[in-house]
Amino acid sequence: MLNGQEAILPHNRLEMQIWYDGYMELFWAALLGLVQGFTEFLPVSSSGHLVIFQRLLPSFSQPGVLFDVTLHFGTLFAVLFFFRKEIFKLSPKYLGYLVLGTIPVVIIGFFFKDQIEGLFNSVKLVGAALLITAFLNFFTSKKREGKKEINGFFAFVIGIFQAIAIIPGISRSGATIFAGVNLGMERKKAATFSFLLSVPAILGANLLEIISNLGKPVDFGFYSIGFIFAFLAGFLAIGLVLKLLQSSRYRLLSYYCIALGVVALLL
C-alpha cells in the first residue's frame, strides 16, 4: 500500500510538467519575437530565418497565423515608435509615395498568393535567395552616398523590389535599401523610406488575416510576450541598420547571409 508521500508524487510530477510546459511556451514566444523583430529590419530575411529555424529545430514553429500576425504588429509598432517624430512631419506628397510604393506588392500578393505560399516549403530556395540578399547587401555597402530625393519613379521602383522580396530568403529591407541607394538616394533616407514602406504592407496584409480569423481562441499571455519581444527587437534592429549603413561594417551582413544560405543549401 502506498504511503501518503508516494500517493501525491504523480500529482506533483504533473504539476511540474504543466509548470515546465507553460514556461517553455513563453520562452518560444519570446524567441520567435526576437527572431522576427531582428530579422524583419536587419537585411537578412525574416521569412528565410523562420523557414530554416523550423527545419533545424522541429519544436520551433509559429503556432498559427494569428501569432504570426501578432509578431508582425510588434515590428509595425517598432517602426511607428522609432520614426514617430518624422511621421508627424510627413507631407501629403511623401505619403503618396508610400502608397505608390505599396502597389507592386499588393498586385503580386493578390494574384500570386497560392504560388507564394508554396515557396515557403523549399529550404534550398531560401538558401539560393539568401545568396541574392548577400549580393544586394554587399553592393549597397560599396555604393557611394547619393544626394537625390525620393520621387514617384523612385518610390515605384523601390516598391517593385519590395514585391520581389516576397520570396523567402530575399530580405525586404535589404532589397528596398539596395534599390534606394542605387537610385542615388542618401543611405539614411533610403533606409527610412524602406522602413516606412513596410507599414502599409504589414498593416494591410495582417488586417486581412485578423478579419478572416475572428472568433478563434487567443492565448493573450503567449501572444503578448511575442508582441513585446518583436517590438523591442525591431526597435533595436532599425537603429542598428541605420548605424551600419554609415560604416563599412554593413557588408558583414552579406557574409552572414552567405553563411546562412550555404547552411540552407546543405540541409
Image (cartoon, grey):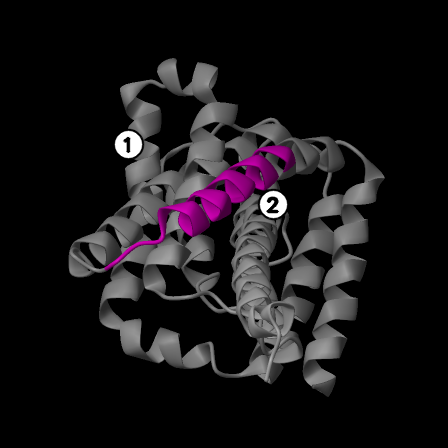
Sequence-wise first label, 1 or 2? 1
User: In terms of depth relative to the viewer, which is nearer, 22 or 228?
Assistant: 22
Instruction: Using the image, determine if residue 10 lies above or below residue 27.
Output: below
Q: Residue 224: say if magenta.
A: yes
Secondary structure, mark 2, is helix
User: In terms of depth relative to the viewer, which is nearer, 12 or 17?
Assistant: 12
Instruction: Using the image, determine if residue 194 lies above or below residue 36.
Output: above
Q: Which mark is residue 55?
A: none
Residue name at image x 60 percent, y 65 percent: 49
Density class for disc 2 (Cα within 10 Å; few <14, some 14-19, many ≥20) is: some
Q: Tell me if residue 211 can be seen.
A: yes
User: In terms of depth relative to the viewer, which is nearer, 27 or 138?
Assistant: 27
* Residue marked by disc 2: 182
Q: Tell me if residue 169 can be seen.
A: no
Residue 62: x and y in percent read 46, 65
Q: Amino acid at mark 2?
A: Asn
Residue name at image x 26 percent, y 48 percent: 204
Which stretch did the figure color magenta?
A: 217-236
Q: Is residue 235 left or right of residue 68?
A: right
Residue name at image x 28 percent, y 39 percent: 99
Instruction: Using the image, determine if residue 106 lies above or below residue 220.
Output: below
Residue 95: x and y in percent read 31, 28
Q: Amino acid at mark 1?
A: Gly
Density class for disc 1 (Cα within 10 Å; few <14, some 14-19, many ≥20) is: some
Secondary structure, mark 1, is helix
Residue 212: x and y in percent read 17, 60
| Quarter location, residue 130 | bottom right
Q: Residue 112: say if magenta.
A: no
Structural distance between the alpha carbons of marks 1 and 2: 22 Å
Q: Which mark is residue 96?
A: 1
